[in-house]
Image (cartoon, rainbow, N blue to C red):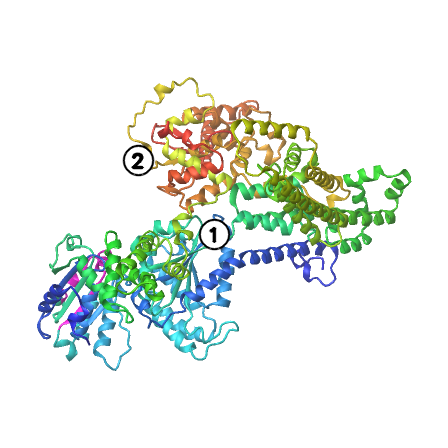
Amino acid sequence: MPPLEHVVLCREAQVSTLQSLFGERHHFSFPSIFIYGHTASGKTYVTQTLLKTLELPHVFVNCVECVTLRLLLEQILNKLSYLNASEGCSTEIICETFNDFVRLFKQITTVESLKTQTVYIVLDKAEYLRDMEANLLPGFLRLQELTDRNVTVIFLSEIIWEKFRPNTGCFEPFVLYFPDYSIGNLQKILSHDHPPEYSADFYAAYINILLGVFYTVCRDLKELRHLAALNFPKYCEPVVKGEAGERDTRKLWRNIEPHLKKAMQTVYLREISSSQWEKLQKEDTDPGQLKGLSAYTHVELPYYSKFILIAAYLASYNPARTDKRFFLKHHGKIKKTNFLKKHEKTSNHLLGPKSFPLDRLLAILYSIVDSRVAPTANIFSQITSLVTLQLLSLVGHDDQLDGPKYKCTVSLDFIRAIARTVNFDIIKYLYDFL
Amino acid sequence: MATSSVSKGCFVFKPSFKKRKISVPIAWLSLHVAQLQEELNKNLFDSLIEFLRKSHSGFHKSSDWGCQIKLREIPTAALILGVNVTDHDLIFRSLTEAIQSNVTHYVVSLKAKDCPDIKHFLQKFVTQLTDCRGDVKSKEEESVQVTQKKTHCSMDLLTTWYKTITKKTGPKMPSKKRITSSQWHCPPVVLILKDMESFSTKVLQDFIIISSQHLHEFPLILIFGIATSPIIIHRLLPHAVSSLLCIELFQSLSCKEHLTTILDKLLLTTQFPFKISEKVLQVLTNIFLYHDFSIQNFIKGLQLSLLEHFYSQPLSVLCCSLPEAKKRINFLSVNQCEDIRRLPSFRRYVEKQASEKQVALLTSERILKVETQSLLENLHVYHLNYFLVLRCLHNFTSSLPKYPLGRQIRELYCACLEKNIWDSEEYGSALQLLRMLAKDELMNILKKCYKVFNSSEKQLGSTVKKIEEFLAEFQNLDDAKEEEDASGSQSKGFQKTDLYHLQKSLLEMKELRRTSKKQTKFEILREKVVNFIDCLVREYLLPPETQPLHEVVYFSAAHTLREHLNASPRIALHTALNNPYYYLKNEALKSEEGCIPNTAPDICIAYKLHLECSRLINLVDWSEAFATVVTAAEQMDGNATTSEERNEIIHARFIRAVSELELLGFIRPTKQKTDHVARLTWGGC
């Protein structure tokens, strides 16, 4: 096993804190340690490599996977029993409650190998514990006390400890913060895994350019590593072709920089997938040709669905009292200047959609469609299917008999595109734009 | 024999007409539709399967430097299917079959309805996955293990399950023919999420995070079924999660194109004897375009009209392929012959004949049958020519600006079915536009038409020749013109011109043009072509009503179809309450407009009274009015019971009527005013 300082970079302070916390094997350690920090700041990696290189008995559990309490507890116990039983006893332990867990935990750790040294339980993505039973988090925090065994629970989370603390109070864990990597750190870590066929300096120069482009938008180490690997072949291209030497940084920079910028707009946002990006690179085509996911905004709808959606949009964003002005052919002589005095200063589009009853939707629908629309079963089922497509949303109760209320959830641009296809000037009917 | 139902008709040993006649065309229809859809989806499925195959090909070999560094992303296919959600099930079913026979056995599809949270999601996933094992033997062993764990399914369980499966089948794969065992040591697991829009964000996020952590030992591929647009992915998943996916987009054929192909293959062909009239076609396409975009429903409508036709038209016996029909004519009974004579189109035909023949047709059955045979044959030929000319005309009109005769062939077909197309204004303007076409456009169209006519054998042979001639002439024109151009351009050259000279030369050119108003060769030829098309249309695109015996194959009862397919519950309810005679057919209920008959059911009286009220209805007034209407009748026959007792009964009846109306959703109690109820419906329906 390689020495720790070669595997874990730029986390010397945290490692030494942890090591001093752990102490000697047989020492009792702090009952619970809470480690937090941003995504990809090395929490999981440092903990895992530390425990592995020191060969400490530990159990590693990811809380996302444990959808129920039972799964979580059983996973811990089973992994523990695998630890001490080298011959592999395959009896599955069944554990329903935390009480059982404490009892079974005591049973398992009676073994000599686990009794004499500290056992570590690492709970990754600990924020999921908050959604489980209320006694779980306080229980894990003082597991050492409850079980009377040499055990330490390590929580890993992206959220600060203050957001965890239960109302009723609990045992305070030792809180350890993993700060974000600085640009220098990132450079060092990323350059560390250079490909075998190129020199470290060459790769470090590449990483330097990459960070120059991406550092402003992304500090996620995993993502940066991914992007580095994805775009590296393009960087090497002039070298492979023999157009530039490995030291010809300026030429290489000019080659890669626009490419990376394009990558930032497309593959980084997952507008186009990594494999598609690689394919484009290989064929050396312009990435502009491939449309990203967001380019496909057009939704084809049946004729009446379009009008229902338009009517819903109008009902959502116009005050109900203005309907008379917009949809009545002979609305009398309402003086425009008087009428248009806006009582609400803010635009309805800033306030978001308001809910409206079904009747209002239908009334507007009948007045904006040129031909006569019969209220057939098809019209009603269209409204429901628009709800399932998430273009409308049902507000409140779902009792269909008792006057259901809806909201329109589409954007102005979307509805304008829809209205254009049926030659309906929607802006003329919107109170905000009068 | 007598009791065998319609659906059994195919299997009856000695079929009589009545039993066979429906089942055969319906079977034909559904078979063809299935085939068509398979063909239409073929491209999509092929590319999808290609994607599925290659996406986990690198599984287990990660020696490459790039592979080690790169994130392991879950291969994901975003399948955009359009808003016709009713059709999706069929597509997913055939997709599952296609994947199972080509890529992997392990295909699971989940619906959002079944997965309110991640626990149920995993449970469904595990149970379905363990169920879709190909061989039954190991399934039994598995099921014991699985059922006891059904209560707590986790990804760990799945990965261990997957390991045992691959270990077991790895070396001695139960070789399904198309899957080469060497290639598929580790078949991927495909998960189809049928309705992406309805899934909750949390469930999806959690599942993607969990499965991405196990991806190295559990090769998962996701397929998202998306009805609207792929933006929904970004709306549902944050960047941290969507960066775990490797999303590729697949778009299915637009449903309008789908409809066009189906119409083309089912209705615009002589293979299928059954035809529908303009009104029926209009009803079916309107439902499709205005309401649901559902191919499934369109086919159902077509099937319904087929059934209705066979059910209501006695002569539909003859609605089958031509040789079969000719055979059947010989077996027609006296009554059926009488039916033929009663057909309006046949009567019109008879009236045009000479008087001896009229008598013969109306009296002799033998002559009638012979005549019917020839008429049916004429009808067949008429259809053959009709569709050819229709396609040809469509080629001409589909590229015109503003599409006077419609962009799609179905619009043109509708127009031609309705009346003489050449009488319509649109046809006139279309011809006008045709007279202005440029040469290369015209030649392109002519080439297309040539192909159309050539595709069918020996029909309209002279027309093919004529088109060929036209094409040749255009070609000649081309050559001649080139020569002309060559000579013309030389004289012009590049001489320097001042303003004066330019003006002069322009004036000269204008003069020249006026004098040579005489048409060029090309214009003459173009005129010829347009006239030729016009003649074709006038000769062959007669509406079907003009053909004798058209009733045999054309279904025209559009209103029944509309009643069945586009039901309007609110109108029906209003009619029932407003005019109870319409449904009850009781003479006592007959009443003129506006007045309320006291003999009507209580709920009808209450309903009619409530129609006159505004948004809030005063219960006391309502009850009083109700009592007045009800007692109006009973006053006539001397009152036997005491008035108090009677009032109580009326009161009870009123309360019952009101609560019935509440149940139907017309009114509801309100807190705005005491003793009032709120009205919930407006307008006449």
* Residue B663 horizontal/vertical position (percent): 45, 38
A340 vs B233: above or below: above
Which amino acid, by three-letter code, is at mark 1? Leu
The residue closer to the viewer here, A318 or B421, is B421
- B89 left or right of B213? right
* Residue A313 horizontal/vertical position (percent): 40, 36
Density class for disc 2 (Cα within 10 Å; few <14, some 14-19, many ≥20) is few
* Residue B253 horizontal/vertical position (percent): 52, 52
Circle 1: element type? loop
The residue closer to the viewer here, B45 or B471, is B471
Residue stretch rendered in magenta on the structure: A118-143
Circle 2: element type? helix
- Say the numbered circle drawn on residue A350: 2
Quarter holding the N terminus of chain B is bottom right
Q: Is residue A129 magenta?
A: yes
- B664 left or right of B361? left
Q: Tell me if label 1 and label 2 are in contact, CB under 8 Å.
A: no
Which amino acid, by three-letter code, is at mark 2? Leu
Q: Chain of mark 1?
A: B
The residue closer to the viewer here, B397 or B444, is B444
Residues marked 1 and 2, same chain: no
Extreme residue in the bottom direction: A87
Q: Quadrant of residue B530?
A: top right
Q: Is residue B532 magenta?
A: no
Q: Circle 1 is placed at which residue position?
A: B81
Whether residue A42 is visible = no
The residue closer to the viewer here, B601 or B179, is B179
